[in-house]
Each structure stands twice: as C-alpha cells, then as structure tokens.
C-alpha cells in the first residue's frame, strides 16, 4: 500500500506558529507545533531501513535521475494554478511546472530534507540572493520580505530580529542548503513530501498583486508657528500596511525633503507652500506623488495690554514689583521677557538691561518691558515712568547685602571709586610651583599649525584660548609627546573645556564653572620614547568665528613636550610634526610661566572699607607675570594672571559684605565661595569699572576661602571690596 504523504501547509504554520516563533528557541532548543517537533522535518519513513547515517558526513554523488519529460506532470491544475517544483533527493534534475530543470541535488540528513537555497529562492521564487563569503551569510530579498541567514551562527535575521535555528543550513559543494521546514515558514510555501518516492513538492505561494498604495492628504490653513492641521487618508488597495511616508516642501523653488512634515514646516513664515507627499506599503511599493498646498497665515506679534508697578512713588531701597498682561494667539505661549530701566546721571543716560528690584537714584526712572512669543516675534515696548522718592528705606549696600542675591549688580557708583580704597592687610602670600603653558597667540587662528610647544616637568597647567577665523572647520588638540630616550609617566589632574561658541564672555564663565566643578582624573599614562597621547579628545571641530578654551592640569615625572596645535578634523594629531609653528600677533599672551598658583591670606579691618586686588601681576611682591615664549626665546607677559589659580582666605572681625568690581571694561565670570560656585554678575556681564556686584557676606569671626581665576575673554584686573555692616549706609 502506498504510504501517505506528509503535508506542511503555510496555513498550518500560520495558524499554529508564526515564522518568528518557529525560528526562535528562546528557552529550549526545540519548539513544537502540536504533535510535530520543529527540530525535525518528520519526513523520515519510520519503516525505511536505509542507513542514513552514512550520508551524514559523506557527499552522495549519484547519477542524476533520468526523467522523461513526456511523463512529467505539466498540468498545474493539481495545485490550483500555483507554480510548483518537484525535487528528488540526490537528483540534479527538478520538475518545474512540468519542465525538467537542472538543479543542485537535494539530500536528506538525519531525517531532514535539505534544499538548494539559490535554486529555490532565486530561480523558482524569483527573489534576490546575495552571498557574503567572508561572513558566511546569505541575504534573501523578495518584495517586503528581507531575510539574512547566518551559516556560522545558525541564525535567521528577519524584521531586524535574530532567531536561532534548530536545524542549521549547510554549505555543500559550494551550494547553500536550507532545511525544508525553513523554506515553508519563511516564504509561505506549501510543501508535500512523498515518503514512498521521496519526492518533495514545493508549491509556491499565490503571487500578491503589485498594486501601489495611494497617497492623499488635505491641509487646513494655519498661523505661522501653529501645529499643522491636516487629514491623511492614504490607503493601500490590497489592504497592506503603510510603512513609510515621505514629504517635500517647495518654497521659492527650493525643495526640502524628510519623513516628518511637522519638522519641515516648523519655521515657515506666512505664505502658500507646495507640499508633495507619497507613501510606501509593506511590499516596498511607493505611491505616486500627491501635490497639494499649505496656506500659512501671518503670526502676529504679542501686545502688552497693561503694565503697572505696585507702588506709585517708591523710596530708595524699597522693594518694588511689576505686573502686566498680554494679548497673543490663544494657542501660543510667551517664551521670553525683556526688561530694562534707565535714569539720567550727570547728563548721561544710564541703562541696565534687567528687571529692577529696587531703585537707588531719586527722580525719574524709565522701566521698559518687551515680551516674545514662541514663534520669535517681539512686542512693541511698553514703558513706565517711575518717580523715585528721596526718602531712604535702605542704602544700596544695605539692600544688596540684606536681600542678598549672589551676583546682584550694584548700581549707585556715581559717588564712589572703589579703587581708591585702602588695600586689605595681607598676612601671608605664597606661590605654588605650577608651570603654566599658555597658548593665546595668535588668538585668531588663520591656518593650521603649531600654536605653542614647550618642554616641562612636575606640576603643569596647559591653557589655551583661540578663535577660528578660517573658512574651514578646525580642531585644537593638546597633546603630550615624549621626545626623550626614556619612558615618562604622566598623571592627569583636572580637565576642563568650554566651547566652541561665538560668545567669548560666556566661554570664560563656562570654563571657570567647568574647572571648579572638575575632579582630578588621576589617570596615569606611561609614554615610551616618541610616544604621543591626546589630552583633549572630545571637543568637536570649531566653525568659522567660534572660540574655544581649555584648562588641563597634569604631572610629568620627567621633562616631556606639550603641544597645542590647530588641525583639520581629518588630520591625525600624531602628525603635528609636519605642521609649521604659527607666528605670534602683536598682542595677546603666549608663553611658559612658573607661578601657576597663588595663595593669599587677609585679615579685614572692622572700621573701614577695603579692597583686594586680583588678576594684576604687579599687585604683589615676590610675584611676576613674566615668562618665556619657548618658540622665540623672548620675554612673555601674563599681566592679567590668566590661568593662575588664586586662593584667597579672608577673616572678618565684624559682619562684612563683599562686592566684586572689575577695573577693565567688559567682565563676566565666576568664583568659588567656600567651594560654592557663584556668578560674579547674575545679570549678564559688567560693562566697566562703574559697575559692581554683591557676592556674599562674611559673618563676624568667620573665615571664608575664595578661589578665583581670571575669566578668559574678560578684562583684568578685578577688586574684591569689603564693606563692614556699620558702613553699609555710606555706600
């Protein structure tokens, strides 16, 4: 009696187990379809006494079956009109839709039918098959299906997920063979196995019509900055999923493309724009482009409808507050507020660009307010004329220190010049031997090259500040190069950088914050002779007119060369030796200085206001801002003490307020007050020596330690001004 066929249908596989689950062996090596172990083909005739073990490790080379084409089944009505192929183990002739076709011979291994992958997938299924000989992988693509088979790992990658296989593909006679079961599950084929004749019939799936999807979208008019309002009714006639969308926005003949229409239109102003749209289905078929219009209306600027102060005639040093209302699009928020106030002083209009908390000049003050909406429109300014009484609630010093806001600007500088104050009593001064290699010349880098180079040992601080004025991007590298004949050990301490940015004042402030916040790395590197090591690898390339600065503390066990160099992003820092030394400018600092840390101790007088000078090289005995430019051998000057760490210890007999007063022009930075980072000016930058800022209070008998470094991009020097409580009413 003829033995029954075993039929594995796509319907059975789909109904009982998804292909991904069948391929996976998440917790076990064998996954079961009810009654049928997935790890075997179940194609073995259990009554067959043939010794199949001999074919496991031996290539069976049989004479191909002689097939009479006249006897081949050439009527595919048996398979409901579907294409089919019949293969016979160990035979190199296949029957494709009734026609004899040459094929690599399939075989049976341990009960598993192994079929030639390229023949089945490429010649029969018409899929694209690509073999990677190095990786030993096969990529099969057909319509939306993309499968990678890894012969080494025995895995299948489908839809971005990796699944292990219980029966691995094999490479035999330069032909990749896959298990019968894998073919059925991955490509939705029906497979019939005749255990009597050993013939394998693969019935191909019904071809899905290649009908593209249809894109359709409609936009409603919106205001500039408003969220898009549209209806997308794109569809696929075959019921397939839409998997991708692509948009084009055409503005004055310029086309921008992307898959996010909201992002493409976010910053568009008033106007009518052409929108092109297409979609892709799961068969990776694209629709035709649909073209429509998007109308964007003008985004009106907000309007300040009311603006008031909480008191009609405030006194000097009295708290004030303001209220206002605005009118704007209902869906749009107010994103920013701009304040300023001004007054006349000796025939000159003095303007401060922040919200006043109190006033300290009797007479008329003008307070101005502007608001900005989320789209970026600024309102017209609204102004209040505030008449300040001559009555005094609190002097400015009393107000600033009583209501301390760290970095709050001190305004009433007309009656005082803090530089005329006596210098506080310094009871101790010491220099720590830290060698600073400072690179700020040329400050404006005009071509690639070596910026500064010198040899040093011991405690070292590497410091650079540069601007890129080239049209090409530029990277600044700081590296250590062992040019000696013996190994050198380098220990890295604090590493801080800021930028790249176009705002130099903010750069100096940020560098100070980062340096004070940094902890010593403690990383140790041993450099062999001619060894090189990059100390600042993480900073991106500088664009044109951007500035960048860095501070790097290291310890070198013996003399070693440190180099700061400007290079292109594509260049290797190790090749710096091929670059020329850049020539210096007339101004700015470049050189090696031997006094990197300065320690000072002061005792304040309880009976008078005093000053402490910081950032001026000639302010202290036994200190010099003179060094050597190692590239020329000439004298170098660091008169602003840039890169020098000042540690100031102050003891007060009585409660004392501390102001900061710059003596140059523009100034912005930070300092540390008992380890707490405080802004020197919380209101932005100070414009000149007629401005000061309250920084803190030293209580009676208290000792405070302040650490400070002259901020890059700001003018030096700077004063710490100490005013005892009893004298607050005088300032």
Image (tube, rainbow, N blue to C red):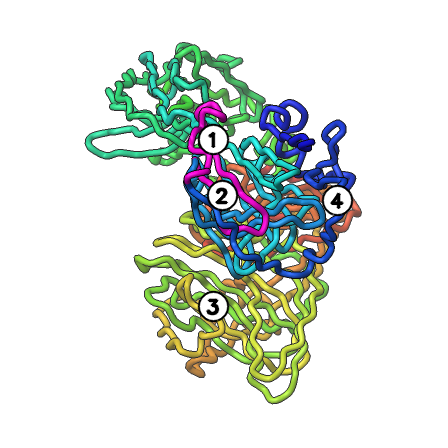
Between marks 2 and 1 in the image, the one whose residue lies nearer the viewer: 2
First in sequence, mark 2 or 3: give its number: 2
x and y percentages locating residue 7 in the rendered image: 63, 30
- The answer to whether residue 710 shows anywhere in this view is no
Which contiguous range is marked in magenta? 70-97
First in sequence, mark 4 or 2: give its number: 2
Residue designated by label 1: 354
Relative to 322, 569 lies left or right: left
Q: Are marks 2 and 3 in contact (CB under 8 Å)?
A: no
Q: Secondary structure at mark 4?
A: loop
Residue designated by label 4: 654
Disc 4 residue crowd, few under 14, some 14–19, many 20+, Cα 10 Å: some
Q: Secondary structure at mark 1?
A: loop
From the viewer's perspective, is residue 590 above or below residue 689?
A: below
First in sequence, mark 2 or 1: give its number: 2
Between marks 4 and 2 in the image, the one whose residue lies nearer the viewer: 2
**Quarter holding the N terminus?**
top right
From the viewer's perspective, is residue 295 above or below residue 136?
A: above
Residue designated by label 2: 120
Residue shown at the point (20%, 32%) measured from the top left: 253
Between 328 and 636, the one nearer to me in the picture: 328
Q: Quadrant of residue 233?
A: top left
Distance (Cα) linking label 3 and label 1: 36 Å
First in sequence, mark 3 or 1: give its number: 1
Disc 2 residue crowd, few under 14, some 14–19, many 20+, Cα 10 Å: many
x and y percentages locating residue 195 in the rendered image: 66, 38
Between 648 and 62, the one nearer to me in the picture: 62
First in sequence, mark 1 or 4: give its number: 1
Residue designated by label 3: 439
Q: Which mark is residue 504?
A: none
First in sequence, mark 3 or 4: give its number: 3
């Amino acid at each position: 009696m003829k033995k029954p066929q075993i039929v594995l249908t796509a319907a059975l596989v789909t109904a009982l187990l998804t292909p991904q689950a069948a391929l996976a062996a998440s917790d076990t090596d064998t996954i079961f379809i009810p009654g049928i172990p997935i790890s075997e083909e179940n194609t073995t005739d259990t009554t067959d006494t043939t010794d199949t073990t001999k074919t496991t490790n031996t290539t069976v080379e049989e004479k191909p079956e002689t097939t009479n084409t006249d006897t081949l089944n050439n009527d595919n009505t048996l398979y409901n009109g579907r294409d089919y192929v019949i293969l016979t183990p160990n035979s190199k002739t296949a029957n494709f839709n009734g026609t004899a076709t040459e094929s690599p011979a399939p075989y049976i291994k341990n009960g598993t039918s192994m079929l030639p992958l390229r023949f089945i997938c490429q010649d029969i299924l018409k899929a694209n098959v690509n073999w990677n000989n190095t990786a030993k992988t096969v990529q099969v693509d057909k319509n939306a299906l993309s499968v990678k088979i890894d012969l080494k790992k025995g895995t299948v990658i489908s839809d971005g997920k990796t699944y292990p296989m219980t029966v691995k593909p094999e490479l035999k006679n330069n032909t990749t063979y896959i298990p019968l079961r894998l073919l059925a599950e991955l490509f939705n084929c029906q497979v019939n196995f005749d255990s009597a004749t050993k013939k394998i019939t693969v019935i191909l799936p019904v071809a899905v019509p290649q009908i593209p999807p249809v894109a359709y979208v409609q936009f409603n008019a919106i205001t500039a900055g408003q969220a898009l309002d549209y209806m997308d009714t794109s569809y696929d006639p075959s019921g397939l999923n839409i998997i991708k969308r692509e948009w084009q926005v055409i503005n004055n003949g310029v086309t921008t493309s992307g898959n996010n229409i909201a992002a493409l239109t976010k910053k568009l102003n008033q106007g009518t724009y052409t929108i092109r749209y297409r979609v892709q289905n799961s068969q990776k078929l694209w629709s035709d482009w649909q073209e429509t219009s998007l109308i964007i209306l003008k985004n009106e600027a907000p309007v300040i409808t009311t603006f008031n102060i909480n008191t009609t005639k405030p006194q000097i040093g009295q708290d004030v507050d303001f209220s206002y209302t605005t009118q704007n699009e209902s869906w749009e928020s107010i994103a920013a507020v701009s304040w300023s106030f001004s007054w006349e002083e000796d025939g000159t209009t003095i303007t401060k660009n922040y919200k006043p908390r109190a006033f300290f000049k009797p007479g008329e003050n003008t307070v101005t307010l502007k608001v900005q909406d989320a789209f970026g429109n600024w309102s017209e300014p609204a102004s209040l004329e505030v008449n300040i009484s001559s009555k005094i609630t609190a002097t400015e010093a009393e107000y600033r220190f009583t209501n301390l806001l760290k970095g709050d600007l001190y305004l009433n500088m007309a009656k005082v010049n803090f530089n005329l104050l006596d210098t506080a009593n310094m009871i101790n001064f010491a220099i720590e031997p830290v060698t600073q290699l400072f690179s700020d010349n040329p400050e404006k880098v005009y071509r690639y090259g070596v910026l500064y180079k010198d040899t040093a040992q011991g405690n070292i601080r590497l410091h650079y500040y540069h601007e890129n004025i080239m049209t090409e991007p530029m990277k600044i590298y700081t590296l250590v190069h062992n040019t000696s004949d013996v190994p050198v050990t380098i220990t890295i301490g604090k590493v801080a950088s800021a930028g790249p940015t176009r705002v130099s004042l903010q750069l100096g402030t940020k560098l100070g914050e980062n340096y004070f916040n940094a902890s010593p790395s403690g990383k140790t590197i041993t450099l062999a002779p001619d060894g090189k090591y990059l100390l600042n690898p993480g900073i991106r390339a500088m664009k044109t007119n951007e500035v960048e600065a860095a501070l790097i503390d290291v310890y070198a066990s013996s003399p070693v060369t440190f180099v700061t160099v400007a290079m292109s992003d594509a260049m290797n820092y190790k090749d710096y030796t091929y670059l020329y030394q850049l020539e210096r400018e007339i101004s700015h600092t470049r050189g090696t200085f031997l006094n990197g840390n300065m320690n000072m101790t002061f005792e304040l007088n309880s009976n008078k206001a005093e000053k402490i000078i910081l950032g001026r090289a000639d302010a202290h005995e036994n200190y010099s801002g003179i060094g050597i430019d190692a590239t020329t051998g000439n004298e170098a000057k660091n008169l602003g003490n840039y890169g020098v760490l000042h540690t100031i210890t102050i003891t007060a007999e009585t409660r004392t307020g501390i102001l900061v007063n710059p003596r140059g022009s523009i100034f912005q930075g930070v300092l540390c007050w008992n380890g707490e980072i405080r802004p020197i000016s919380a209101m932005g930058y100070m414009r000149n020596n007629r401005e000061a800022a309250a920084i803190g209070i030293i209580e009676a008998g208290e000792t405070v330690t302040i650490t400070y470094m002259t901020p890059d991009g700001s003018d030096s020097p700077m004063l710490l001004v100490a005013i005892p409580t009893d004298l607050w009413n005088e300032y």
